[in-house]
């Protein structure tokens, strides 16, 4: 099997994921807060995703200026009847990841975003944590230091959640359909999930691109989904979050076909929309989170990690004019985000200011306070080359949820991920080439 033949200058078929060789210091208390918030964010996203009206209303204006959001809303509208018919018995599988950075000036832990589709690196992160512990032990570090490496097993948690949804779906012969990008470089993070699914649960996984689904998937009566002779219990998307994943109408047809199936969709279109940047911004508006989370303690827990977020729907509204003026004057204090996932899409600095000055189509973006994480020094290993750099880090906490109708079968904090990047880099994705995998050393 040859996977990940990326750089023609590297004369091997396999390139290791970029990583640090030692964990990064991270405050224990903030880390624990991020962990504790995972199940609350699961509940919040689950409630948002179940509110069709809210999603339509919140995303309507962004969709007017952003074709991709409009297409997703199109699938959402086209499948409304199926969704309504199934709602009482709906099988939900969520694998979310909420990402945070410490803000040094305020001392707060602030949420960067929540991912509801293709929340990746659970498996590689588990391995990097193990590797860091191993290296520290081999290097003779004292037990008190090793105790500062929080154990976790995102790999098993993610596979267990998928298996729980598959089990709830039906018979033992059911399989998981993993929807992947053609030529995926980060394939091993995905193969690990499939391996654990088989080894722990005897659940088989099929890998297909959306084009292959368009070609080979069949939808039977009542939404029974068949691919490659298998009945599909769970559709696990590791693709479908970017417009590039839909080069032709065939991929959109495939997405809609999957949406009509009775499989647990991780995520459904509704869940994907609930993870939109625009929704994140709207949730920060006073009273919105409180509507979805009636428990004041839960609402406070998520609100505590919201950064400054502004919608730009009406650039003439006084509060929008005020923040636009501030952002144009000090663009480095803000990040401008379109409705995109996967890294490399945000605007910073002069580019941000130029887009704001245009005033046109701003509803497709959200404006966010620039978080200022504390700097560290880390040794990064990329393609076998070690490099010492000044860095900042982002912590992600996975959350898994399985629900059938009103019955929540599982709602768990499911492990963590640390990504570290050069302080000079604006963006942060590992797959996008900006960051490397890391693990926390609690201080
Ligand atoms: P994506 O869905 O593409 O991952 P993110 O919102 O996570 O979008 O942004 C990508 C990266 O940009 C993050 O990993 C982080 O490094 C950086 N970033 C995003 N928002 C902020 C912010 N408010 N302050 C500082 N950096 C940010
Ligand atoms: Mg994202
Ligand atoms: Mg991100």
Image (tube, rainbow, N blue to C red):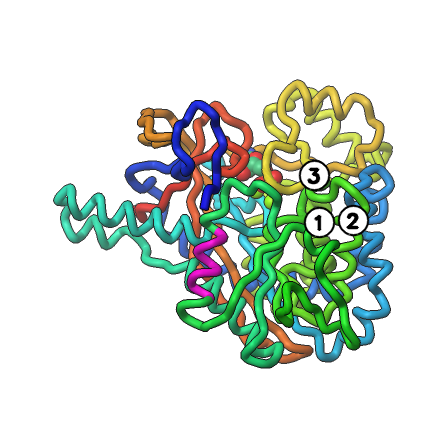
Residue 259 image offset from top left, x and y in percent? 75, 62
Tell me the crowding category of disc 1: few under 14, some 14 to 19, or many 20 or more residues within 10 angstroms, Cα based. Answer: many
Q: Which mark is residue 258?
A: none
Residue, disc 1: 211
Above/below status of 239 relative to 321: below
Residue 38 image offset from top left, x and y in percent? 51, 60
- Residue at image coords 67%, 49%: 240
Q: Mark 3, mark 2: which one is toward the viewer?
A: 2
Number of marks in picture: 3
- Report the Cα–Cα distance between label 1 and label 3: 12 Å
- Residue at image coords 74%, 28%: 324
- Range of residues picked out in magenta: 190-197
Mark 1 residue's CB less than 8 Å from ligand 1: no
Helix, strand or loop status at disc 1: helix
Question: Is the Cβ of the residue at disc 1 closer than 8 Å to that at disc 2?
Answer: yes
Residue, disc 2: 250
Q: Which mark is residue 244?
A: 3
Task: Answer with left or right where residue 79 lies relative to residue 378.
Answer: right
């Amino acid at each position: 099997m040859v996977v990940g033949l990326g750089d023609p200058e590297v004369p091997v078929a396999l390139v290791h994921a970029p990583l640090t060789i030692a964990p990064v210091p991270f405050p224990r208390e903030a880390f624990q807060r991020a962990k504790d918030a995972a199940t609350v964010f699961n509940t919040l996203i689950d409630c948002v995703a179940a509110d069709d009206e809210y999603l339509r209303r919140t995303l309507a204006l962004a969709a007017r200026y952003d074709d991709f959001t409009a297409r997703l809303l199109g699938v959402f509208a086209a499948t409304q009847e199926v969704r309504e018919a199934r709602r009482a018995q709906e099988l939900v599988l969520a694998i979310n990841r909420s990402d945070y950075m410490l803000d040094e000036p305020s001392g707060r832990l602030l949420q960067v975003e929540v991912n509801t589709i293709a929340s990746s690196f659970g498996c590689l992160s588990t391995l990097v944590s193990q590797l860091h512990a191993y290296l520290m032990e081999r290097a003779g570090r004292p037990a008190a230091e090793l105790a500062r490496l929080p154990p976790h097993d995102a790999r098993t948690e993610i596979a267990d959640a998928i298996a729980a949804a598959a089990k709830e779906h039906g018979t033992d012969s059911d399989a998981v359909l993993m929807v992947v990008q053609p030529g995926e470089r980060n394939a091993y993070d995905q193969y690990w999930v499939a391996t654990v699914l088989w080894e722990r649960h005897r659940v088989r996984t099929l890998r297909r691109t959306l084009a292959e689904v368009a070609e080979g998937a069949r939808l039977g009566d009542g939404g029974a989904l068949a691919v490659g002779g298998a009945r599909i219990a769970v559709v696990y998307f590791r693709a479908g979050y970017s417009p590039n994943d839909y080069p032709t109408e065939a991929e959109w047809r495939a997405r809609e076909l999957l949406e009509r199936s009775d499989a647990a969709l991780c995520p459904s279109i509704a869940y994907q929309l609930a993870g939109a940047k625009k929704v994140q911004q709207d949730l920060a508006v006073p009273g919105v989170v409180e509507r979805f989370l009636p428990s004041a303690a839960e609402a406070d827990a998520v609100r505590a990690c919201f950064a400054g977020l502004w919608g730009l729907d009406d650039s003439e509204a006084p509060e929008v004019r005020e923040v636009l003026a501030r952002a144009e004057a000090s663009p480095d204090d803000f990040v401008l985000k379109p409705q995109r996932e996967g890294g490399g899409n945000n605007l910073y600095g002069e580019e941000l200011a130029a887009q704001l000055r245009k005033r046109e189509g701003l509803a497709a973006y959200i404006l966010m306070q620039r978080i200022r994480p504390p700097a560290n020094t880390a040794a990064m290993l990329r393609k076998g080359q070690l490099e010492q750099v000044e860095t900042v880090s982002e912590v992600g906490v996975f959350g898994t949820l399985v629900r059938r109708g009103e019955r929540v079968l599982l709602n768990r904090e499911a492990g963590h991920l640390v990504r570290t990047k050069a302080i000079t880099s604006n963006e942060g994705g590992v797959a996008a080439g900006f960051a490397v995998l890391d693990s926390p050393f609690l201080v």
